[in-house]
Image (spheres, rainbow, N blue to C red):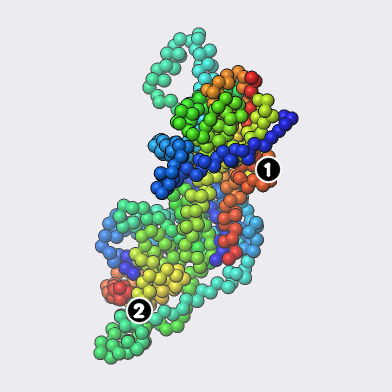
Amino acid sequence: MAVRMLLVINKSGGLIYHRSFEGDVDKGLNSNDYLILASILHGSFAIATQLTPKALQLSQSSSKNIDYTVPYIPYVGMPRGRTSSERSKYGASAPQGKLGSFKGDDFFKESFQSWNRSGVRQLCTDQFTMYIYQTMTGLKFVVACSQGTLSPANPSSSNNIFNIHVADNFLRKIYCLYSDYVMKDPFYSLEMPIKSTLFDKKVKQMVDNLV
Amino acid sequence: MAIYSFWIFDKHCNCIFDREWTLISNSASGTINSKQTEETAKLLYGMIYSLRSVTQKLSRDDTANDVRSISIGKYRIHTYCTASGLWFVLLSDYKQASYAHVLQYIHSHIYVKYVTHNILSPYDFAANENETRGQGFRKIGNRNFISSLEAFLAPMIAQ
Amino acid sequence: MKSKEDINQSDKKMDRPNVASNAPTVADTQEMTEQQKLQHQLQIFQNSLPKVSQTAYMMLLNECVPLSMAVERKRGDCNSKLDRNCDDEVSQAGEQLQKIHVSPPLDPPSHQLCRELYEADEEKHNRVLDRLRNIGFEIGNKITELLVFSNNPNLQFKDMDLLSVMKFICRDVWRQMFNKQIDNLKTNHRGTFYLFDYDYQPIQSFALDSESSEKELQMVKPFLEIAVGVIKGVLASIGHAPEDVICLASYVDRPDEKPKASFTKGVSFHVQITM
């Protein structure tokens, strides 16, 4: 579950936010390497569309069958006490911090569509797994974690579909934070690196909640 | 669970074998070592290569950190890289988690048996300097390799 | 080949004591017959021999063919150089200088040498085959020594008759070299023998193209010559001079009841001995 790093890539492939959560991870990497990483990930999206296997191109029906709806998985990245009964019990005594402009105790409570339909969603390597969530506007949120899954409830889950869904839920919440703390920042200019300390703080909080 | 195509790349960035199935219902359909897939092979190699260079850089220690699988919307790419620089790549549907054991089997029981031990087949498919760096055109064409690979992969095509 | 006789059956019978002796249990040690004791000793002797990986050994054996071709190439090069340099002392000196300083270039890869051998003219081809037969001949000579003088109780060359010598080749030599026995032995009892090996081990994984072709069979044929040499070598060490022995290898179809191996053809060794 340990999150190693979080990236935000804008729609033209530029790295606008990058944060490592483990000190030794970026030993050998300078900021230029991260820029390269971002553009490679961005580029692989374009290539991935070209690589769609012939069998899938031919059978339209089977590709239509694929459901891009991501189910809502409750309280990913929210403070401990995951069932609603626990939550209401503790909720009264230790009130959660306000979720910015979001109402309720979770950012959203409905399933949503994944807009990452022909790009890389998950990259498994020997040492970490990387998940990419793409918004409708082309913004990409990338998270790398040392274990396969982000789900604190099932830390040993090896079901890839479930893991992708958990990561999508988590990254969509980062997106909510982005919309709340970056988009509403009057000094932020679009497509430029994010320097908001408030966003920093909230992201850190959410990542910590995963553990 | 279904598989769509299978590729082998050698250490010179050349695609030395490719097999693509076009109809899931028919395990004999599709192409073997086709000219038309050349472009696809290059794109596939390029993508894995660049992602691999990234993950190698992000490695926590000095050990190699190889790409195992890449999940892409409708399908999934599984890779298995050997120390000798061979890449075995399999494209499957998006559900299957890991084909590592399958690719490893292909390497150890089919490739080694019918290509490495076959003295009539080259062990390095680039015959000279001009055929390295993705410029090669030689492919694995021997019948033992193809038939045992087909026999091994056929049950997985439409499951 | 008038009175062809299938002596495969008797072959199997003779094999039995060897199998039984593989694991003598502690309980019946007291009742071990003299024969069993000898068997046990042989087993211990064989276990004491240094072991070599079957794979590495087969690879090395097969590399003899491209090696012989490489030697042939080198020889050709030398000859042409000598011819050229006779009237040109200066370039000869330069040539020698180069030999001293630069490490010799690597031989072409094995598959290319095999192809060259296939394409070579008959004279060259025969020279390479002779070289291979000589390698086999040497191996055959030595392997007889090893097998005969290791107190093997399964061997009885009572009156040194040809049949028992051939059986020795089919069973012991073949097992030592290829880890299997000859599948079938046929004879007319007048010095003509046919040894059938339906899945000759060294060539099993060889294949050229998606279709089996005549070219492939011809390219693989030199690999049979080592075994031909071995047969001649064994016979020579037992007292049949190489001049009196004709041994030829050819392809045969596999009988239907044999399981399909990866190489399309079986091998037949035709041995003719004049007495």
Quadrant of the rendering where the N terminus of chain C is positioned: top right
Question: Is C164 left, or right, of C153 in this rendering?
Answer: right
Q: Is residue C76 visible?
A: yes
Residue A190 falls in which quadrant of the image?
bottom left
Quadrant of the rendering where the C terminus of chain C is positioned: top right
Image coords of residue A30 (percent x, y): 30, 56
Q: Is residue C73 visible?
A: no
The amino acid pointed to by label 1 is Pro
Q: Is residue A71 depicted above or below C173 in this figure?
A: below
Chain of the residue that carries numbered disc 1 in the rendered image: C
Image coords of residue A22 (percent x, y): 28, 64
Q: Nearer the viewer, residue A94 or C246?
A: C246
Residue A36 falls in which quadrant of the image?
bottom left
Q: Label 2: few (<14), some or many (≥20) within 10 Å?
A: some
Q: Is residue B73 depicted above or below C169 in this figure?
A: below
Q: Is residue A18 depicted above or below C191 in this figure?
A: below
The amino acid pointed to by label 2 is Asp
Instruction: List the residue tagged with mark 1.
Output: C255
Image coords of residue B19 (percent x, y): 58, 53
